Image: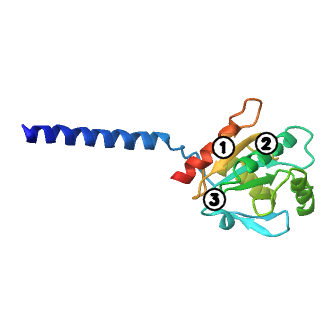
């Protein structure tokens, strides 16, 4: 009778462990894409790219500094995310221009100051249009490009391996508010 009780208890432990393992996997954020290697120019006129982001969690968006529409709101929201994730040392924020002709390093630096960007934490990037096209459409999957860079109002959350793990709307009642929590989930992986 004791051995039967041990068998039942062993089976119960195995089932409990299996259900916990499935719950952990279900709790993981999906992999939505992969950001390929890139090097752009940051707001300080320095090269900046995947080598600077590998091993870090980061949030990315596309903007342009003279945007009369959604960019100011998006940048304000990024400022909120920067503040709400200040305890996540490895998290970086990356804003990539869709207007490389006007968004020079100087223009991006001034834009960042307007929104409280912390040096070394929030990076503004520019570069060749072809590379910006690839990042926007293929790597981040934020929007289709038809020969001219279009504007997306979503944020992307990228993990330590450069994989896109979440896309978040920035509209009213947008899903962007989940970014701090989801970044913490990525930390636990």
Distance, label 3 to label 2, CA atoms, is 26 Å
Is 8 drawn above or below residue 124 in the view shown? Answer: above
Q: Tag 1: Cα neighbours inside 10 Å, few (<14), some, or many (≥20)?
A: many
Pick the front one: 78 or 96: 78
Residue at x-position 38% and y-position 41%: 20
Q: Would you name the residue on which mark 3 appears?
A: 36
- Going from N to C along the chain, the mark reached first, 1 or 2, is 2
Visible residue check, residue 183: yes
Q: Position of residue 10 (x, y in %)?
A: 20, 43
Q: Position of residue 186 (x, y in %)?
A: 56, 50
Q: Is residue 24 left or right of residue 103?
A: left
Which disc number belongs to residue 77? 2
Q: Position of residue 55 (x, y in %)?
A: 60, 63
Q: Is residue 29 left or right of residue 178?
A: left
**Which mark is nearer the camera, 3 or 2?**
2
Q: Quadrant of residue 41?
A: bottom right
Q: Would you name the residue on which mark 1 appears?
A: 179
Residue at x-position 88% and y-position 57%: 108
Q: Position of residue 44 (x, y in %)?
A: 85, 67
- Going from N to C along the chain, the mark reached first, 1 or 3, is 3
For the N terminus, the image quarter is top left
Q: Tag 3: Cα neighbours inside 10 Å, few (<14), some, or many (≥20)?
A: some
Visible residue check, residue 147: no
Distance, label 1 to label 3, CA atoms, is 22 Å
Is 105 drawn above or below residue 30 in the view shown? Answer: below
Mark 3 residue element: loop
Q: Is residue 71 left or right of residue 36?
A: right
Mark 2 residue element: helix
Which residue is farthest left? 1
């Amino acid at each position: 009778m004791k051995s039967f009780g041990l068998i039942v208890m062993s089976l119960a432990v195995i089932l409990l462990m299996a259900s916990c393992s499935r719950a952990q996997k279900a709790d993981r954020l999906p992999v939505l894409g992969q950001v390929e290697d890139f090097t752009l120019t940051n707001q300080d006129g320095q090269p900046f790219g995947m080598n600077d982001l590998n091993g870090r969690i980061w949030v990315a968006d596309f903007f342009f500094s003279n945007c009369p529409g959604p960019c100011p709101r998006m940048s304000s929201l990024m400022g909120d995310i920067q503040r709400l994730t200040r305890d996540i040392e490895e998290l970086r924020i990356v804003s990539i221009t869709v207007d490389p002709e006007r968004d020079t390093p100087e223009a991006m630096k001034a834009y960042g100051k307007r929104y409280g960007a912390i040096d070394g934490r929030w990076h503004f990037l520019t570069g060749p249009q072809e590379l910006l096209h690839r990042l926007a459409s293929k790597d981040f999957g934020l929007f289709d490009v038809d020969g001219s860079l279009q504007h997306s109002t979503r944020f992307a959350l990228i993990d330590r391996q450069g994989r896109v793990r979440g896309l978040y709307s920035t509209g009213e009642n947008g899903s962007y508010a989940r970014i701090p929590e989801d970044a913490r989930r990525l930390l636990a992986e």
